[in-house]
Amino acid sequence: MQPMPHQVMGYDRAITMFSPDGRLLQVEYAKKTVRLGNTAIGITCKDGVLLVTDKRIVDKLVVADAIEKIFLIDDHIIATAAGILSDARVLVEKAQNKAQENRVTFDSPIDTLTVVKDMCSLKQLCTQSGGLRPFGVSLLVAGIDEDGTKLFLTDPTGLYYQYRAAVIGEGEADIQETLHKEYKESMSVKDALALAAKAIKNFLGENFEPQRIDAAYIDAQTKTMKKISQEEINAAVK
């Protein structure tokens, strides 16, 4: 008799149920959701840390400028996401509150890693509690602390990693290969924007339009977020 697929046997019905080979299937489904999400790229540079994301405009009547997929957590920390963006907003709002509480309590900016750990603690909790589902979203969190630029990637399990350059979402494998080949630690934000735009353009092909790109960075000197204008994006794509 052929063994029944894990899904048919019901191992994916509860987040707390392991399959016989030690997998949490709902967590794996959440990871698949992330891979279907909009492309998002993070790159650390000599003069800051950059986030670039695909707005994925699905209707020509949508106002492209009104779509925001890069979130300000604190003056010196920004984030973007791939997957279920409504899940991302919950995590971002929680991180914003955490950052505000830190400033009120300690009169100092919060550390980027503290924000990431707090996000991931909630994500992990949702992988072991009955009646919940995993957050179907990965986030790139970029910031500048006293000891330099930071870029973290968080996944639906609650794991996090620090990167020099990373990508999540659609086209992850192809774009990651481009980053491996062309990323340099000496890159400026302008160079990194050109690299990220090129990688997204190569992946999307005929579907690419400069208006699809949203980009922002934390400046190393001022430690504040700066939005990249559409004119700068258009120039980077050429």
Image: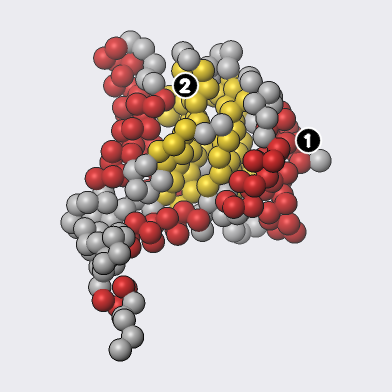
In the image, is 175 to the left or to the right of 23? right
Do tag 1 and tag 2 residues touch (Cβ < 8 Å)? no
Which residue does the image show at 68% across and 55% down from the upper left? 204
Which residue does the image show at 59% across and 33% down from the upper left? 43
Which residue does the image show at 42% across and 49% down from the upper left? 137
The residue pinned by badge 2 equals 75
* Crowd rating for badge 2 (residues with CA inside 10 Å; few <14, some 14–19, many 20+): some
Which residue does the image show at 21% across and 58% down from the upper left? 16
Q: In the rendering, at what x and y percent does residue 86 appear?
A: 40, 49
In this view, the residue farthest toward the bottom is 1
Nearer to us in this view, 52 or 100: 52
Q: Secondary structure beneath disc 2?
A: loop
Q: Amino acid at mark 1?
A: Ala
| Quadrant where the C terminus is found in the figure | top right
Q: In the rendering, at what x and y percent does residue 214 appear?
A: 61, 40
Q: CA distance from mark 1 to mark 2?
A: 27 Å
Nearer to us in this view, 204 or 2: 2
* Crowd rating for badge 1 (residues with CA inside 10 Å; few <14, some 14–19, many 20+): few
* Numbered label attached to residue 217: none
| Quadrant where the N terminus is found in the figure | bottom left
Q: In the rendering, at what x and y percent does residue 57 appear?
A: 60, 54
Q: Secondary structure beneath disc 1?
A: helix
Q: Quadrant of residue 189?
A: top right
Q: Quadrant of residue 181?
A: top right
Q: In the rendering, at what x and y percent does residue 111 appear?
A: 39, 21
Question: Is 20 placed above or below 221 here?
Answer: below
In this view, the residue farthest toward the top is 107
* Numbered label attached to residue 235: 1
Q: Quadrant of residue 49?
A: top right
Asked whether the viewer can see residue 192, the reply is yes
Q: Amino acid at mark 2?
A: Asp
In this view, the residue farthest toward the right is 238
